[in-house]
């Protein structure tokens, strides 16, 4: 009897040992799932000589014992030998490197000691009818597999990513692939790489397997309150950092900051120091033909000149500059031309961003300035621009106006609205982006802006700016109800080359460092929001720190992020990061472009127009007092007298004995000499006549 009891206890112990890896519930009870192979058999404990079992029978590639080093269902045969005929065909149809590597890993799921649970889940109603082509995939791994292989196995990917992962992904908190025995990974957002601390080359594995997670590479630190980063599009691959205080600095292609500012207008800029004060240098946009005409456009706040007194706190000014003719790394401050001035009462909701679209028109974005109806009575007519998007044509040959109005502007012939307005109803446009690769036959652009949902709201929205729309009433593209009231920071539509999976996505974030993307659906009519995650410092060698201030874009379409740990302008805590897709080389061969050194302006107008300014189209517009070809002839009004020559505007070069602005004054000595000369001439004439008369007689 004692022996019988002993054997019964031993049998129970062995049974419990085999189910030791069963799933435990929330209260600690043992669930019904045991370790079983796909055919229902018990996994076999591998001997040491059997453990180096490769997916394809060789030691040189990823091996299944990496995931299941102690127990396996493959025994002594390679994993692909366990595949059915149709499955084997699917797993061998691609030569794509990333897809093939994922497929090799998924083959190992049949070696899992939990293979029966991975391929047949009782939580799914149609589990009995499911053909075990793939195991139940973890959520992030499923999406990575979909995007890596959808173009190479069309027979498997007949739906979009959400429908695919709804069928092949784990929807509850159960076991999913990738799994591994020492520490089970459960949950739809889990990933086995987070647990593989003892596996070699964890960093490389992280780069290859974390779907939708990106890295940031720190480019520069020590910036003084950066507000933007732009490129000039001249082939030099330079970046230009905007500092709120009124400086623009050049970042060379080898990521070195030039000490001498490209533009220094800090004496003109009225800069806000306190938190929430948006005054300062706001935006910079280079002309699409900057390489030839050297034109750039700047917006900033100032309290100088005629608007400094009265009820206005400051003005928001948009001006045009031209790069120095001799030094392509500096702006000529003498070339400033004022475009627009808008009076402002408050120091928030200013807007001020400038951007050019592929149509060549300049778009100017203004916030509502927190202006009320009572404030409007005190404002001048320029306040009609508040809360609006302006669209103007700077490529004009007219010298009397800095820009012209595009004829297809919605209010071109209106008597109630300024013709510059393209759309209105904005509150506090943070940053706007235009898709440089998309324009339809009607000339419509894809312009996305971050904004507030209402004047006094803290929730953000993303708008698609369209011609003539009033965004007080128009629905937004995306509504963000932020629980922490972090301001929304608009980004860019990624059109770079380094990341293929991010191409065409609108990347945005908020000040607290939460990022997301908007991607068009396959039908192209709606946008879908997705979270954008960044890897840790251990996996990316760098991580974002500080508040998010803005985004930037280089000539190749790659994206940059600006941060700062403090809001004070005097602090040098600004950092610049570059967004990197860890699944690809930082600079793939197909993305490399030759750097063109910046060249001085060589146009005829820039060389010959000395007494005027050149329009973006190359027309020489004369300054007051000059005329003629390239403004070489000075103009004097009224004209110079007594043979004088007009040397400078309203300044005559007079002959000897004459003076005055128009050489109208004659010296006294000249007058006396003239009188004596006339008398002598009369005497000579009289004597001549007397001699002539005597000769006749």
Image (tube, rainbow, N blue to C red):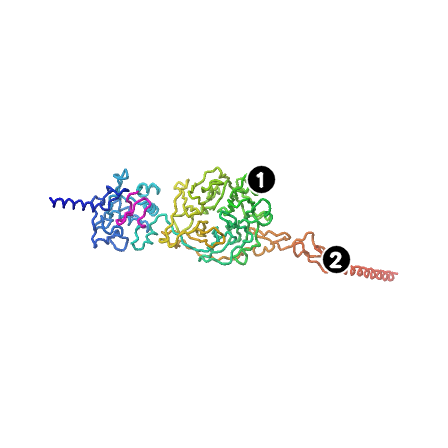
Question: Is residue 503 or residue 86 the one in the foreground?
Answer: 503
Residue 280: x and y, percent? 52, 50
- Is residue 183 found inside the magenta-colored segment of the image? yes
Q: What crowding class fits label 2: few (fewer than 14 Cα within 10 Å), some (14-19), or many (20 or more)?
A: some
* Location of the C terminus (image quadrant): bottom right
Local SS, label 1: loop
Q: What crowding class fits label 1: few (fewer than 14 Cα within 10 Å), some (14-19), or many (20 or more)?
A: few
Q: Main secondary structure of the magenta part?
A: loop
* Location of the N terminus (image quadrant): top left
Question: Is residue 263 or residue 569 the one in the foreground?
Answer: 569
Question: Is residue 451 or residue 674 the one in the foreground?
Answer: 451
Question: Going by the picture, which residue comes out furthest to the left?
Answer: 1
Is residue 508 visible in the rendered image? The answer is no
Residue 591: x and y, percent? 41, 53
Q: Is residue 376 left or right of residue 62?
A: right
Is residue 402 visible in the rendered image? The answer is yes
Q: CA distance from mark 2 to mark 1?
A: 58 Å
Local SS, label 2: strand
Q: Identify the disc placed on residue 666.
A: 2
Q: Identify the disc placed on residue 377.
A: 1
Residue 382's image quarter? top right
Name which residue lies at 73% across and 58% down. Answer: 658
Tag nearer the camera, 2 or 1: 1
- Which numbered disc flags the more N-terminal residue, 2 or 1? 1
Q: Is residue 626 left or right of residue 292?
A: right
Residue 415: x and y, percent? 57, 38
Residue 604's image quarter? bottom right
Question: Going by the picture, which residue comes out furthest to the right?
Answer: 697
- Is residue 384 found inside the magenta-colored segment of the image? no
Name which residue lies at 25% across and 47% down. Answer: 112
Magenta-drawn segment: 173-194
Residue 651: x and y, percent? 67, 55
């Amino acid at each position: 009897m004692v022996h019988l009891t002993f054997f019964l206890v031993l049998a129970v112990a062995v049974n419990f040992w085999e189910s030791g890896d069963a799933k435990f519930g929330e209260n600690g009870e043992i669930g019904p799932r045991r370790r079983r192979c796909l055919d229902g058999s018990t996994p076999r404990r591998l001997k040491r000589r059997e453990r180096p079992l490769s997916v394809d029978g060789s030691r040189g590639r990823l091996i299944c014992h990496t995931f299941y080093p102690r127990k396996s269902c493959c025994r002594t045969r390679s994993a692909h030998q366990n595949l059915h005929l149709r499955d084997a065909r699917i797993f061998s149809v691609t030569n794509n490197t990333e897809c093939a590597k994922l497929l090799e890993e998924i083959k190992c799921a049949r070696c899992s000691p939990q293979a029966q649970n991975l391929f047949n889940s009782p939580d799914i109603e149609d589990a009995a009818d499911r053909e075990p082509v793939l195991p139940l995939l973890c959520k992030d791994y499923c999406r990575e597999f979909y995007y890596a292989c959808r173009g190479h196995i069309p027979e498997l990917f007949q739906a979009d990513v959400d429908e695919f992962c709804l069928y092949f992904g784990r929807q509850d908190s159960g076991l999913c692939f990738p799994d591994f025995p020492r520490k089970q990974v459960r949950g739809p957002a889990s990933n086995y790489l987070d647990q593989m601390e003892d596996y070699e080359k964890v960093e490389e594995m992280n780069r290859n397997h974390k779907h939708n997670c990106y890295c940031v590479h720190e480019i520069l630190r020590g910036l003084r309150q950066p507000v933007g980063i732009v490129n000039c599009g001249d082939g030099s691959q330079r970046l230009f950092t905007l500092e709120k205080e009124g400086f623009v600095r050049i970042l060379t292609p080898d990521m070195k900051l030039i000490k001498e500012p490209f533009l220094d207008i800090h004496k003109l800029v009225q800069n806000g120091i306190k938190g929430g004060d948006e005054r300062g240098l706001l935006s910079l946009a280079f002309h699409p033909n900057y390489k030839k005409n050297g034109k750039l456009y700047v917006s900033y706040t100032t309290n100088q000149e005629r608007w400094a007194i009265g009820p206005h706190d400051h003005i928001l000014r948009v001006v045009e500059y031209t790069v120095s003719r001799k030094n392509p790394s500096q702006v000529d401050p003498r070339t400033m031309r004022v475009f627009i001035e808008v009076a402002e009462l408050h120091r928030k909701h200013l807007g001020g961003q400038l951007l050019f679209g592929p149509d060549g028109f300049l778009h100017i974005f203004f916030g509502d300035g927190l202006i009320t109806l009572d404030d409007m009575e005190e404002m001048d007519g320029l306040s009609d621009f508040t809360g609006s998007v302006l669209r103007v044509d700077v490529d004009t040959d007219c010298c009397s106006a800095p820009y012209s109005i595009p004829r297809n502007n919605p209010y071109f012939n209106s008597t109630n609205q300024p013709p510059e307005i393209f759309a209105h109803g904005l509150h506090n446009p943070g940053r706007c982006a235009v898709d440089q690769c998309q324009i339809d036959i009607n000339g419509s652009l894809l312009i996305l802006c971050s904004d507030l949902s209402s004047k006094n709201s803290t929730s953000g929205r993303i708008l698609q700016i369209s011609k003539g729309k009033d965004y007080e009433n128009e629905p937004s593209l995306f509504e963000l109800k932020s629980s922490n009231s972090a301001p929304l920071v608009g980004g860019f539509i990624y059109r770079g080359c380094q990341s293929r999976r991010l191409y065409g996505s609108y990347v945005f974030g908020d000040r607290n460092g939460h990022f997301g993307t908007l991607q068009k659906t396959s039908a192209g009519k709606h946008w879908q929001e997705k979270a954008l995650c960044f890897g840790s410092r251990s996996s990316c060698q760098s991580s974002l720190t500080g508040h998010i201030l803005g985004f930037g874009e280089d000539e190749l379409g790659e994206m940059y992020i600006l941060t700062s740990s403090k809001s004070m302008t005097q602090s040098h805590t600004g950092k610049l990061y570059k967004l990197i897709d860890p699944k690809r080389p930082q600079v793939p061969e197909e993305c490399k472009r030759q750097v063109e050194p910046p060249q001085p302006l060589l146009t005829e107008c820039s060389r010959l127009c000395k007494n005027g300014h050149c329009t973006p189209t190359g027309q020489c517009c004369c300054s007051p007092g000059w005329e003629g070809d390239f403004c070489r002839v000075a103009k004097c009004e009224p004209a110079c007298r007594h043979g004088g020559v007009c040397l400078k505007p309203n300044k005559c070069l007079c002959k000897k004995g004459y003076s005055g602005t128009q050489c109208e004054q004659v010296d006294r000595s000249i007058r006396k000499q003239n009188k004596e000369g006339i008398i002598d001439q009369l005497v000579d004439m009289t004597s001549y006549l007397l001699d002539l008369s005597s000769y006749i007689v």
